Image (cartoon, rainbow, N blue to C red):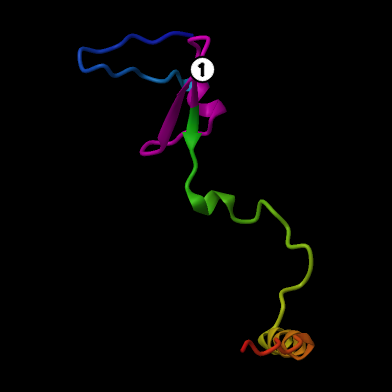
C-alpha cells in the first residue's frame, strides 16, 4: 500500500491500515523512528482505553480495614530510645 504526500506534508492512511488499527476520524497517531531508519505508526490510545486491562488481584480494601491495619502497624512500632 502507498500514499502520496500533499504540498502540506500530509498523507492519507490507506483504508485497510485505518481498519486494522481501528482508527476513526479525530483519533491521534504516534510515529516512532527506529535506529535502522524504519518508521512505525501506532494509534495513540487515551488513558480511558486502559481501563479494565488488568484484573484486580483481590477485592478492594474497605476504609475500616485500612484503619485497623494502620492501628495494628502503629502498635507494633517499638518506641525509639531517647537521645541525650
Work out whether residue 74 or residue 32 is closer to the camera in this orientation and state it.
74
Q: Position of residue 53 (x, y in %)?
A: 66, 51
Query: As displayed, is residue 57 above or below residue 69?
Result: above
Q: Position of residue 42 (x, y in %)?
A: 50, 29
Work out whether residue 69 or residue 30 is closer to the camera in this orientation and state it.
69
Question: How many numbered dots are placed on residues in this image?
Answer: 1
Q: Residue at x 76, y 72 (%)?
A: 59
Q: Is residue 55 magenta?
A: no
Q: Is residue 51 left or right of residue 31?
A: right
Mark 1 element type: loop
For residue 2, what is the image quadrant?
Answer: top left
Q: Position of residue 34 (x, y in %)?
A: 51, 17
10 Å crowding of disc 1: few (<14), some (14-19), many (20+): few
Part of the protein shown in magenta: 17-41
Q: Is residue 61 left or right of residue 84?
A: right
Q: Which quarter of the rendering shows the C terminus?
A: bottom right
Q: Position of residue 26 (x, y in %)?
A: 36, 39
Specify the farthest residue to the front: 84
For residue 73, what is the image quadrant?
Answer: bottom right
Residue labelled with disc 1:
34
Q: Residue at x 33, y 9 (%)?
A: 4
Query: As displayed, is residue 4 above or below residue 24?
Result: above
Work out whether residue 45 or residue 58 is closer to the camera in this orientation and state it.
58
Amino acid at each position: 500500500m502507498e500514499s502520496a504526500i500533499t504540498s502540506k506534508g500530509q498523507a492519507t492512511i490507506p483504508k485497510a491500515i485505518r481498519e486494522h488499527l481501528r482508527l476513526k476520524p479525530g483519533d491521534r497517531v504516534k510515529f516512532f523512528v527506529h535506529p535502522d531508519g524504519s518508521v512505525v505508526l501506532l494509534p495513540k490510545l487515551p488513558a480511558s482505553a486502559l481501563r479494565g486491562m488488568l484484573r484486580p488481584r483481590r477485592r478492594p480494601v474497605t476504609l475500616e480495614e485500612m484503619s485497623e491495619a494502620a492501628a495494628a502497624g502503629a502498635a507494633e512500632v517499638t518506641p525509639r530510645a531517647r537521645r541525650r
